[in-house]
Image (cartoon, rainbow, N blue to C red):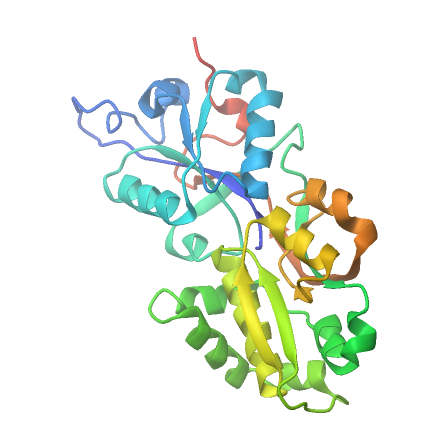
């Protein structure tokens, strides 16, 4: 869940004048002691099946000051809507989030220190394929094996996709970065309609990488089906051979439990992106620097 990274985003600010609205009455740069009451000790999460959600649950269990806090499982779209509304109304909110993501372009955020390391360190996004894929489609295998881009590349596609479809944003990125694409396709031959099942997850980071890979393979003559599923289904599909390729696994922390379960039945081609990060995040104007600074329930 996770530049591409996963995080709890803690954001909020208070009005300079007092307010009768509990959520809007805090001072973002002042004492965070009242923060728990302002948030009703809740965190706005994303989909229940996300690796991000699993890590967030574990974080609530491991930190003594977070015992009793509740993770409200929602959706990515719901989380982003709540985040935007809270910031626009200058109200505090804690959400689960990740980088690379356009929210870090739109809002001025910082990561909270994670002394217990419950979110792991720097995350990578890996490419995995089914067993036998190299023998069946050697040229496609070479392309997906070579695929590597930077967090800024992914963010460029995601940011563009706020105004256009991910498919169009991916095609524009591929057209703009033909030199890079040529390195991935060098020495491979075009085909005539061979089918590839590309399995992904339903989050913006993977919508970006999935559609870029789909575009590249289609330019080489493949007929590509891109299917977004929950992470555990993604691993199951590659392990069973129902899917051919995925460029979506977040490792070593976010999808660790799924990877351990299926690692003997898949081929891991290594990182296609390095620099995703997992953690809790706050706006830079917030006077809070660590997860341990979040107030406990009294």
Residue in the image at 66% along x and 83% along y: 194
Q: On the rendered image, what quadrant is the C terminus found in?
A: top left
Residue in the image at 31% along x and 34% along y: 13
- Image side of residue 176 versus residue 216, left or right: left
Q: Does residue 214 lie above or below 84 as drawn?
A: below
Which residue reaches farthest top?
A: 298
User: Residue 230 in the image: x percent, y percent?
Assistant: 55, 49
User: Residue 81 in the image: x percent, y percent?
Assistant: 32, 46
Task: Tell me if residue 11 can be seen.
Answer: yes
Task: Tell me if residue 279 can be seen.
Answer: no
User: Residue 107 in the image: x percent, y percent?
Assistant: 38, 50
Residue in the image at 58% along x and 87% along y: 219
Residue in the image at 40% along x and 21% along y: 41
- Image side of residue 85 versus residue 271, left or right: left
- Image side of residue 216 versus residue 144, left or right: left
Q: Quadrant of residue 258?
A: top right
User: Residue 288 in the image: x percent, y percent?
Assistant: 47, 30
């Amino acid at each position: 869940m996770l530049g591409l990274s996963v995080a709890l985003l803690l954001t909020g600010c208070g009005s300079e004048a007092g307010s009768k609205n509990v959520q809007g009455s805090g001072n973002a740069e002042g004492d965070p002691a009242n923060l728990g009451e302002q948030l009703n000790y809740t965190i706005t999460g994303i989909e229940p099946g996300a690796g991000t959600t699993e890590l967030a649950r574990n974080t609530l269990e491991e930190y003594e000051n977070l015992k009793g806090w509740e993770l409200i499982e929602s959706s990515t779209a719901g989380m982003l809507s709540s985040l935007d509304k809270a910031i626009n109304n200058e109200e505090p909110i804690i959400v689960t989030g990740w980088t690379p993501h356009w929210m870090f372009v739109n809002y001025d955020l910082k990561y909270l220190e994670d002394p217990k390391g419950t979110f792991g360190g720097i995350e990578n996004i890996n490419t995995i394929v089914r067993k036998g894929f190299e023998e069946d489609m050697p040229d496609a295998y070479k392309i997906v094996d070579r695929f590597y881009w930077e967090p800024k590349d992914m963010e460029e596609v995601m940011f563009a996709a706020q105004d256009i479809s991910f498919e169009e944003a991916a095609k524009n990125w591929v057209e703009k970065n033909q030199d890079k694409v040529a390195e991935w396709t060098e020495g491979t031959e075009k085909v005539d309609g061979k089918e590839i099942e590309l399995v992904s997850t339903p989050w913006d980071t993977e919508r970006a990488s999935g559609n870029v890979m789909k575009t590249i393979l289609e330019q080489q003559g493949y007929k590509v089906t891109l299917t977004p599923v929950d992470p555990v289904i993604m691993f199951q599909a590659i392990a069973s051979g129902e899917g051919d390729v995925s460029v979506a696994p977040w490792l070593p922390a976010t999808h660790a439990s799924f990877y351990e379960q299926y690692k003997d039945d898949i081929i891991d081609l290594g990182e296609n992106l390095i620099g995703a990060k997992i953690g809790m995040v706050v706006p830079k104007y917030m006077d809070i620097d660590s997860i341990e600074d979040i107030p406990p329930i009294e």
